[in-house]
Image: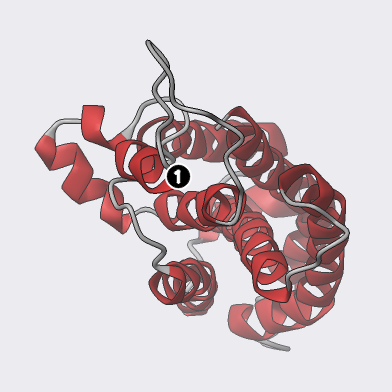
């Protein structure tokens, strides 16, 4: 669970850092040319995503390659497990990236935007990932609300890749209890069996859905005080 928490936190953190470093020049240029009507905010985001998404996917694939030997035996490669790792890392990066883009629409300071996004993702990581606190230990209303958070599905993919395919080297004896991977998953993330299709679909839907939502936000008329703030 500690490894899974670190993977999610690093994916979110790298997404935040990359976005606050690369996106502000695009935003500044857009604000300067907005009055001329050369292009819309959605057009600018499409251009940015065309550049960003391939590089983030390649970086996530490299991270999944580095993580795989820590999770399973590299001498017996499993393409499905690698895909779970890749989807969890890539969608976590994209979600953090799109959250930063959303906040940078109204915040000039990259640091303030990074702090706001970090706070949101830390709360999600603490309550929905099953790494800091198990799903069974949460109140019922929090368990229901966690189903609407990307972190739950990305964490479920990582738990599935890490535990369901792992052989337990444990021999029951007096005073020794050997829990099965399914029992551990039931305690940590709330279900004992793999739900890969749901987890993959939900993880990708959160990332791409927020990307589409940002395009709608950037299509709205930009207030004058916001344009003035970014021109300075």
Q: Which residue is under mark 1? A: 181
Badge 1: few (under 14), some or many (20 or more) residues near its Cα, within 10 Å?
many
Give me the residue at 66% from left, 34% from top: 3
Q: In the depicted view, which residue is nearer to us: 90 or 232?
A: 90
Q: 94 or 106: which is nearer to us?
A: 94
Percent position of residue 186, x then y: 31, 44
Q: Dot 1: what SS?
A: helix
Split into 4 quadrants, where in the image is the N terminus?
Answer: top right
Q: Nearer the viewer, residue 55 or 43?
A: 55
86 lies left or right of 198: right
**Protein image colouring:** secondary structure
Asked which quadrant contains residue 184, the reply is: top left
Q: Residue furthest front?
A: 173
Which residue is situated farthest in the left direction here?
A: 140
Of 180 and 126, the residue lying toward us: 180
Residue 124, placed above or below residue 78: above
Name of the residue lying farthest toward the top: 175
Q: Residue at x 47, y 36 (%)?
A: 125
Q: Quadrant of the rendered structure where residue 75 is?
A: bottom right
Q: Measuring 44% from the left and 56% from the top, which residue is drawn there?
A: 150
| Residue 121 x, y percent position in the rendering | 50, 39
The x and y percentages for residue 108 are 65, 43
Q: Is residue 195 above or below residue 2?
A: below
For image coordinates 74% across by 53% down, the residue present is 19
Horizontal side, residue 145 vs residue 3: left or right? left
């Amino acid at each position: 669970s500690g490894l899974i928490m670190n993977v999610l936190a690093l994916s979110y953190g790298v997404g935040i850092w990359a976005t606050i470093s690369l996106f502000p020049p695009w935003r500044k240029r857009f604000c300067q040319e907005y009055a001329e009507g050369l292009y819309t905010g959605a057009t600018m985001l499409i251009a940015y995503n065309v550049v960003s998404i391939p590089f983030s996917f390649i970086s996530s694939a490299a991270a999944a390659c580095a993580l795989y030997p820590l999770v399973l035996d590299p001498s017996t490669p499993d393409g499905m497990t690698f895909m779970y790792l890749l989807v969890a890392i890539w969608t976590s990066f994209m979600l953090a990236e799109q959250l930063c883009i959303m906040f940078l629409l109204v915040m000039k300071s990259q640091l303030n935007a990074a702090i706001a996004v970090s706070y949101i993702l830390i709360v999600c990581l603490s309550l929905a990932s099953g790494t800091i606190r198990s799903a069974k230990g949460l109140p019922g209303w929090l368990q229901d609300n966690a189903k609407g958070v990307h972190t739950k599905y990305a964490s479920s993919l990582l738990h599935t890749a890490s535990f369901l395919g792992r052989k337990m080297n444990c021999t029951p004896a007096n005073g020794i209890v050997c829990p099965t991977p399914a029992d551990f998953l039931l305690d940590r993330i709330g279900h004992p069996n793999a739900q890969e299709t749901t987890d993959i679909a939900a993880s990708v839907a959160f990332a791409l859905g927020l990307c589409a939502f940002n395009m709608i936000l950037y299509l709205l008329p930009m207030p004058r005080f916001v344009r003035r703030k970014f021109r300075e």
